[in-house]
Image: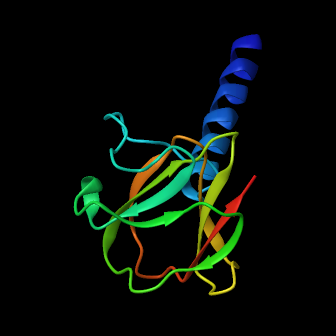
C-alpha cells in the first residue's frame, strides 16, 4: 500500500513540473555555458540562435518594453542580478506573457509572435 502512495505522489510531482515547464512558468537553460556578450545586470536578445549574431537588444530598466523586428529563433539571456525576471509577451503592452526567464537562464526562442518584454524584480 505505501509503495503505491509513494509512486502516485512521485508521478504527480513529475506531472506538475512538466506542466509548469510547458507553460513557461519554469525556465530551464541548456547544459552549455552561458552566452557571452551580455553585460551583468542586463537581459539580452541575440541576433540568432546559439547566441549567434551578437547582442542586438539589451534591457536594463524595469517595466514593459516594445519588441520590434524580431523574427525567427533568437537566444534570450537573462543576465540580470538580484533575482530579477525577464518575460516575453505576445501583447504589445506586456500582456499574454508565456515565457519567464529567471536570473541566469537562457534559451533559443522563436520571437516571431512576441511584441513586448517585461523586466521585473
| Screen quadrant of the N terminus | top right
Q: Nearer the viewer, residue 78 or 110?
A: 78
Q: Which residue is at the front of the view, 64 or 101? A: 64
Q: Residue at x 61, y 35 (%)?
A: 14
Q: Quadrant of residue 7?
A: top right
- Residue 75 x/y as whole percent: 36, 59
Task: Name the residue rendered at 75%, 21% in the picture.
Answer: 5
Residue beneath the point at 34% across and 49% down: 37
The residue drawn where x is 54% and y is 53% is 42
Which image quadrant is residue 16 in? Answer: top right
Q: What colouring method underlies this structural image? A: rainbow
Q: In this view, does 42 lie to the left or right of 11?
A: left
Residue 115's spot in the image, x, y percent? Answer: 54, 83
Q: Point out the residue furthest to the top here.
A: 2
Q: In this view, does 56 lie above or below 67?
A: above
45 over 66 or under it: above or below? above
In the picture provided, is 63 more to the left or to the right than 74?
A: right
- 78 and 8: which one is in front? 78
Q: How many marks?
A: 0
Amino acid at each position: 500500500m505505501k509503495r503505491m502512495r509513494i509512486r502516485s505522489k512521485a508521478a504527480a510531482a513529475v506531472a506538475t513540473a512538466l506542466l509548469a515547464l510547458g507553460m513557461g512558468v519554469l525556465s530551464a537553460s541548456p547544459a552549455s555555458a552561458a552566452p557571452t556578450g551580455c553585460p551583468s545586470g542586463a537581459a539580452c536578445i541575440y541576433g540568432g540562435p546559439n547566441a549567434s549574431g551578437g547582442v542586438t537588444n539589451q534591457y536594463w530598466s524595469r517595466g514593459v518594453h516594445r519588441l520590434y523586428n524580431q523574427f525567427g529563433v533568437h537566444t534570450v539571456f537573462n543576465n540580470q542580478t538580484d533575482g530579477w525576471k525577464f518575460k516575453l509577451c505576445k501583447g504589445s503592452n506586456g500582456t499574454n506573457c508565456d515565457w519567464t526567464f529567471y536570473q541566469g537562464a537562457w534559451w533559443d526562442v522563436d520571437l516571431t509572435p512576441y511584441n513586448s518584454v517585461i523586466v521585473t524584480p
